[in-house]
Image (cartoon, grey):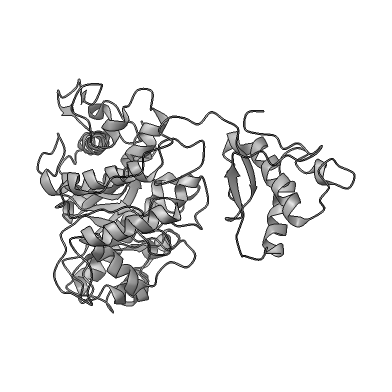
Amino acid sequence: MASMAALLVVVFLAGCHVVAQGRSTAAAHGIGVNYGRVADDIPPPARSVELLRAVGAGSVKIYDANSSVLRALAGTRMRVSIMVPNEIIPGLAASAAAADRWVAENLVPYYPETRVKYLLVGNELLSDYSIANSTWPRIVPAMENLHVSLRRRRISSVKISTTLAMDALTSGSFPRPPSAAAFRPDIAGDVVRPLLRFLNGTNSYYFVDAYPYFVWASNNDTVPLEYALFQGGGGGGGRYVDPGTGLTYTNMLDEMLDAVVHAMAKLGYGGVKLGIAETGWPNGGDYEQIGCNAHNAAIYNRNLAARMARSPGTPARPGAKMPVFVFSLYNEDLKPGPGTERHWGLYYANGTAVYPVDLAGARPLRSYPLLPPPENDAPYKGPVWCVLAGRRGEKLNETAVGDALAYACGQGNGTCDAIQPGGECFRPNTTAAHASYAFNSYWQQLRKTGATCYFNNLAEETTKDPSHGSCKFHSSLD
């Protein structure tokens, strides 16, 4: 893998249309990139800006208002999206002064040298039911207070919005047919309609996080992979006709976007503009996660960029240009959850390209070098175990592993009985050996209820049976 990655980055750098040479003032025109930083040892902001420019990104979205990042983006003319943290939204809604102070501290010092274009109030707020009472009713009031602050300062070019996942719709990520889509009844009238009214009145965008990967992965028996990767349109089920509108779809992303369009129209705001806050395809994941590989990720993002450059819009809104942000700049190794959560990057954490891509969509698709063949487009049916991750050359962090071991042993039913003194897996009596057993025992018991093989980045999946002697590690097939 290392030699292949090195080869790919050489070809990538040779084939790029835009490679940073110092601080250029030329505007980039490609689609945008989400610049997340939940990772160890990623390049600093200045280098990250160079990497954004190298893939032809025309805009960038960050999940806060980090001063170092915003300073690094000054003078680049990239369109920048900054985000208000979820937890402070009630405070901004309750106090116009607090909203004005946030603008004064997090936007004004960098604007207009840093070309802030969007101010997003929260991230996927309507997916978090724990804040339904505290935050949902306060999204629009917070937006209104921020809008007043911008107007007072005569900042008219910054649009205010928020980002919502597809689960804001009653049918979630797979709303087929799109024309039947509607917003969830718990949010439609009290939350979404006021939001759409605000967006319509300020000529802003409804930003959606739309991931065809998840639709295909959950429905790969009925949705062709080609359809999810913008390679539909031919035979073999590569198209879908909406019986309600007669519109023909040749890719899953268009279906998802038009579902939001129809849902907005049902609330009386069918003209609100649409933007894509997040989309993409994972370049890796867990053994049991289908289709997550660099081959498919490259095809998806290349075709997405080409499509947006050549033929923006959707069947319901042909030609409608929209802001689009690919997720993400880096593989973020500190993100919890399934393996795909840590494998969406255009770059590895060391700044090496995962695959070459031109986000301006100008590079002919046939000019790219051959990709490594996909190896997991069909479900993996063999056994899987969860063990302590191997870290070559790194000393075992006894404290962190001990804490994770204690957590695993405190969950489930008899999770760590076998590693107690006298148990069949007590030997070898080391933290590492006991952690592997505990991680696996926990995961095998609880994975069907959402448990993952992560443990703060200390665990990894393996297809090699870690059992030894009389010590039996249960597998995913047991």
In the image, residue 79 lies at what x, y percent?
Answer: 21, 64
134 vs 282, nearest the viewer: 282
Q: Is residue 348 above or below residue 287?
A: below
Asked whether, in this view, residue 286 is left or right of residue 36, the answer is right
Specify whether 179 is left or right of 40.
left
* Viewer-proximal residue among 327 and 314: 327
Q: Relative to 268, does residue 65 appear above or below in the rendering? A: below
The location of residue 105, given as percent across then percent down, is 34, 77
Relative to 475, 174 lies left or right: left
Residue 10, placed above or below residue 225:
below
Q: Nearer the viewer, residue 165 or 461?
A: 461
- Name the residue nearer the viewer: 258 or 467: 467
Q: Is residue 392 left or right of residue 175?
A: right
Counting labels gives: 0
Residue 279 image offset from top left, x and y in percent: 31, 47
User: What is the quadrant of residue 268 in the picture?
Assistant: top left
Residue at 17% x, 50% y is 322
User: Taking the image as drawn, is residue 105 in sight?
Assistant: yes
Could you say which quadrant of the image residue 265 lies in? top left
For the view shown, which residue lies furthest in the left direction? Answer: 319
Viewer can see residue 80: no
Q: Position of residue 308 (x, y in %)?
A: 16, 47
Image quadrant containing the C terminus: top right
**Identity of the residue furthest to the bottom in this view:** 109
At 28% from the left and 32% from the top, the residue drawn is: 226
Residue at 34% x, 58% y is 353
